[in-house]
Image (cartoon, rainbow, N blue to C red):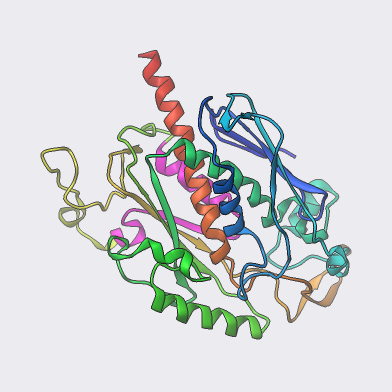
Amino acid sequence: MAGNSFGNIFKLSTFGESHGAAIGGVLDGCPSGIEINLEAIQKELDRRKPGQSAIVTQRKEPDTVEFYSGIFEGKTTGTPIGFAIHNTNQKSKDYSHIKDSYRPSHADYVYDQKYGFRDYRGGGRSSARETASRVVAGAIAKQFLSEIEINAFVSQVGTMKLETPYQELDFSNIEKNPVRCADMEMASRMEDYIKEIRKEGDTIGGVITCVAKNVPIGLGEPVFDKLHAELGKAMLSINAVKGFEYGSGFEGVQMKGSQHNDQFNQDGSTKTNHSGGIQGGISNGMDIYFNVAFKPVATLIQPYETIDKDGNTVQTQGKGRHDPCVVPRAVPIVEAMTALVLADYTLLNRTIKGKE
């Protein structure tokens, strides 16, 4: 199986399955001498872990990370950083009913067709549990990018959409509610709605908005390695993501060029920021902001029709512990992938400047 690594210089490779002994990764290319706050890394994992509130999966995992290399006396050594998170609360029997059948809108069928064999327990390698390893690496990237501030929050659940511009929101509210919405009133409404959806045995999708402040000018290349292209790839690699837009995004098509153009101030900043902090594929020093759309979780705790490995139509029903809405737990994942991209492109920029 290919495609288990992300990044060029600041490069993460992950391993493990949802119901295996452990998941983990190796982070290569992190510069030496970076002070590492292990508590901050664990805090990021705690934001993603299951069982943290009534509106997420009730799988109970401590998600405690163990480091095996690359960190000594609180600082990075410059060597590969190896780590693992042991799985402690697997209930593989919850998946025995899908051993020979395929869940709609999951990776089950295509996985079996491609590899001829699959670990059906929780989705195996295709499970969103793999993203815990990304959060560890992203937490390290955040500490490397100490001057850059990255905040993601839930801006939409179903048809409930937060219309307030991010500049007017208080990001300190994000961790004060289980939905991780930056507006407390909207967060309460979203929470009630998710609980209703859960009682129905159904699921709902949502949108996460991410804002990166203090990004220096010059990250990204103007052709195939555009900064926004790499951010898009990073976000679309997250389970259940169906869309990515940055800056004015799809709403920008409704504007005239005279409205959409970001006019310059004398210092090179811009009066507006429809570009989303990126022009010509290169960061321009303004805030980078984008939206990530997540589909409704595919596992339904209600009867549904599907096919088995022989092509027969069968009736089944989702079992076990699943998220009725993935976006609250996906917030730290979006932040982590943003940090990985910015860390990688920061090092790429240093390499290019060093050759000039």
Picture quarter containing residue 256? bottom left
Taking the image as shown, residue 45 lies to the left or right of residue 19, namely: left
Q: Say above or below: 67 vs 110.
A: above
Give the x, y percent position of residue 253.
29, 59
Residue for point 55% across, 34% down = 7
Residue for point 72% across, 60% down = 61
Taking the image as shown, residue 158 lies to the left or right of residue 352, namely: right
Q: Quadrant of the N terminus?
A: top right
Q: Is residue 326 magenta?
A: no
Q: Quadrant of the C terminus?
A: top left
Residue for point 49% across, 58% down = 243
Give the x, y percent position of residue 332.
53, 55
Give the x, y percent position of residue 215.
34, 40
Taking the image as shown, residue 196 lies to the left or right of residue 64, namely: left
Q: Is residue 245 magenta?
A: yes
Taking the image as shown, residue 25 lies to the left or right of residue 89, namely: left
Give the x, y percent position of residue 231.
46, 45
Query: What residue range appears in magenta?
Result: 226-252
Camera-nearest residue between 230 and 254: 230
Q: Say above or below: 245 vs 282.
A: below
Residue for point 72% across, 68% down = 104
Camera-nearest residue between 345 and 243: 345
Q: Residue furthest left?
A: 266
